[in-house]
Image (tube, helix red, strand yellow):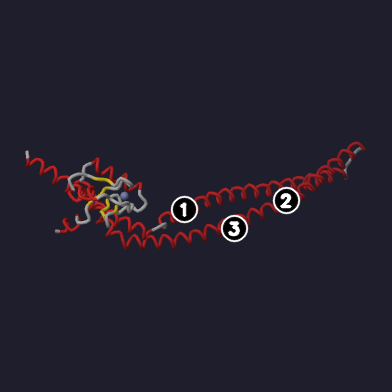
Amino acid sequence: MAKTITQTIASVENKLKALHQLQVIDTEVDKIRIVRGELPLEVQDLEDLIAGLNIRLEKFNEELTALNDNIVANKNSIDLATDAIKKYEKQLKNIKNNREFTSLTKEVEFQNIEIKMAEKNKIQHNANVLHKTEIIYACAAQITEKEEELKIKQGELKKIIKETEKEEVALMKDSEKAEKVIDERLLNAYKRIRGKVANGLAVVSVERDACGGCFSQIPPQRQLDIQMHKKVIVCEHCGRIMVDSNIFEEQEA
Ligand SMILES: [Zn+2]
């Protein structure tokens, strides 16, 4: 019976030690990620921006093709009208009566109006093409600029990742190992607290009679309970899991 109790006590203490160790490891991982800072996000944002700009560029190019098609169609209608006029003028040389003359001159007049309209359209179409071309150049220049920016940021990120990768992989392995010792319920509580607090510290020790996380005073009796490591005690103010500050030395020993 006594043996069972000892085992239970030891297991709580071991769990707290493992939890504390996990916290130390995770804090190291946090430090690495702080070094990387906003870079991964900045790289992602730039990649998204460039993808968006490329879609726009593609759309602008399609619009330019349509505008150029308009120019070709317009030129065709001028050619057709010119040919028609030539044909009518030829016929005018061989007219048989007044009615035919009136009819042909009306046709010529009509074709000339067509040409005039097409010439007017041509000016507008050319202006449209010029405008669209300018937009395309500006868009392409922006893409080039952002791609250069991305290249620099990717380089920086790659360098930082390379510098810290080995350490991070080792820490992640240690983290997994430490997690295995802790039961699921406690581990989930740890993760939940870690996600909630700004500094990522879910396990803290008592520092100068206060919680190492939120600095609230801890009554002497509670401090004694924490020192015993017989049960999981959380800070009444911030909810962090409390351990005694000598837990680390015990672990080292
Ligand atoms: Zn606290």
Q: Amino acid at mark 1?
A: Asp
Outermost residue to the front: 220
Outermost residue to the top: 99
- Tell me the SS state at disc 2: helix
Q: Residue under circle 2? A: 124
Residue 42 image offset from top left, x and y in percent: 44, 56
Residue at 30% in and 56% down: 29
Is residue 177 visible to the viewer in this orientation of the structure? no
Q: Residue under circle 1? A: 45
Q: Residue under circle 3? A: 138
135 or 31: nearer the viewer: 31
Q: Ligand 1 within 8 A of label 2's CB?
A: no
Q: Ligand 1 within 8 A of label 1's CB?
A: no
Q: Ligand 1 within 8 A of label 3's CB?
A: no
Front label number (3 vs 2): 3
Q: Label 1 vs label 3: CA separation? A: 20 Å
- Tell me the SS state at disc 1: helix
Front label number (1 vs 2): 1
Residue 168 image offset from top left, x and y in percent: 28, 57
Residue at 20% in and 50% down: 224
